[in-house]
Image (cartoon, rainbow, N blue to C red):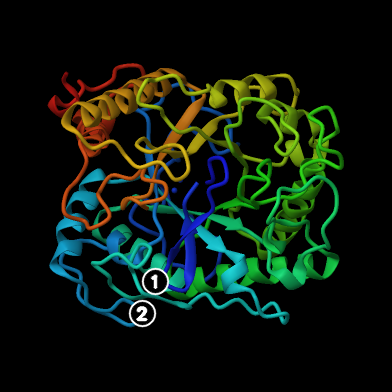
Amino acid sequence: MTRGGRGFVRVGALFAVAALAASGCGGDGGERGPRTATAPVPGVESDGSASTAQPRLPLGLTEFNAQLLRPAGSRPRAGLGPSPARFDAVRRQVSALRPRYLRVVVDWLRVGADPTGTPALSLPQNGCVRDIEPCAAFDGVRAQLQAAREQQDAGGGWEVVVVIAWTPEWAALPPRGCERPGTEPRARAITAEGLVAYRRLIREILALGREIGVPLRWWSPYNEPNHPAFVSPQRAACDPKSPSLAPAVYARFVRAARAELAAAGGDRRLVLGELAGFRGPSERATGVGEFVRALPDDVACAGAVWSQHQYVRPDGRQHDAVGELERALDARPCTAGQPVWVTETGIGGVEAGKARASDAAALRRQCRAQYDQLVRWDADRRVAAVFQYTLRDDPLYPVALFDPGLTRAWPVYDVWRVWADAPGGGGRRGSAPPAPPSCAA
């Protein structure tokens, strides 16, 4: 969710990420399942293991603007007001992608800044990106779940994966250890009081899902715990050889989430990791393998699936963070062979603050590099889903599918579209669809 020092992009009063779920389930009495409620999760069997006969790589999406997630032609409703025509044009293109999963990131700092721990899950957003128009207001997490419900009713898929990020200042421990200059309290380790409120946040999100009729099966306890923007400090001393503090911090979130979801009952599954794709340990960050190796057994063994973030460079020379995660998982008996979701990927200006090159040749290279990476993941039977990170470019981290003004889709959109349009919903794993013409040199 962050690459380097990148943080979340402001979308109205909330932050949206700037650093990216198809069978539904019940189990929350009162929830109405989507049309795919009885279908198996592609690539993941009921026990969480990777299936051997998989359809082509299932796709997911991370997006924060609920207005962009709605089906085309949707009418204004409570919490989802009118929107410009440009939104409806993009909605048609987004709906055509038919994502299997929708990753909903809950910024706890913004929705839970009240020391009572009462989350503001309907906090209004202006629907811009860094105040760039067009804008279309919506009511926070509530509206995101409402949009998912509309898509589920319209055609299935869009199973929600809940991800929690950041900590309210009142729930954070004081500064300590090796921190980056300007570190904010939102990144610091959580207090005991904060963990009580964290469990309350999960209960409130579950209740909102029941109210709207969106099954909430998949839960990621915390975003990018190996990144100093989300857990700080990573080490007591500014030395890559100093043991990482992050796994112990993350373990507290996982145990609290597991206990709360068990108490709620129903089919609830943990997505572990959400790891930033660092090439290796550094004085202020924890490497992927390093993080996995340091987790306590009860935490490492608790997930149904693991998740990794890996962005794509136009030259194709990105670090294989997914491969590193797989090797680390295989070194532990209880995680060997577990499926992996790539829950954030994208291409463009993949270095924080760097603009997307938008000349024709550069856009073709971006298109081809993303296509080539999807082909590699499609051939890896461990990779059970890949999520595009956002629809609309944030000028400070432009890795999305559309420009900030929603005037055009970048050629890389066609890569995701050919995957969605492949015959039979994707064909078989390892048999990739042809690259779109927009990727041709």
Label 1 crowd (10 A; few <14 / some 14-19 / many >=20): many
Which numbered disc, 2 or 1, marks the residue that appears first in the sequence?
2
Q: Identify which residue is drawn at 61% across, 31% down.
A: 278
Where is residue 124? Give x, y as percent.
43, 78
User: What's the CA distance linking mark 2 and mark 1?
Assistant: 6 Å
Where is residue 330? Give x, y as percent.
68, 20
Q: Which mark is residue 101?
A: none
| 100 sits to left or right of 166 | left
Per the image, the residue denoted by label 2 is 79
**Quarter of the image that includes the C terminus:** top left
Q: How many marks?
A: 2
Decide which of 313, 197 is in the foreground and name it.
Answer: 313
Which three-letter amino acid code belongs to the residue tagged 2?
Answer: Gly
Q: Identify which residue is drawn at 82% across, 70% down.
A: 193
Where is residue 386? Give x, y as percent.
42, 35
Q: Is label 2 in contact with label 1 (beta carbons under 8 Å)?
A: yes
Which three-letter amino acid code belongs to the residue tagged 1?
Answer: Ala
Q: Is residue 273 above or below residue 268?
A: above
Q: Secondary structure at mark 2?
A: loop
Decide which of 420, 114 is in the foreground and name it.
Answer: 114
| 28 sits to left or right of 212 | right
Q: Is residue 197 visible?
A: no
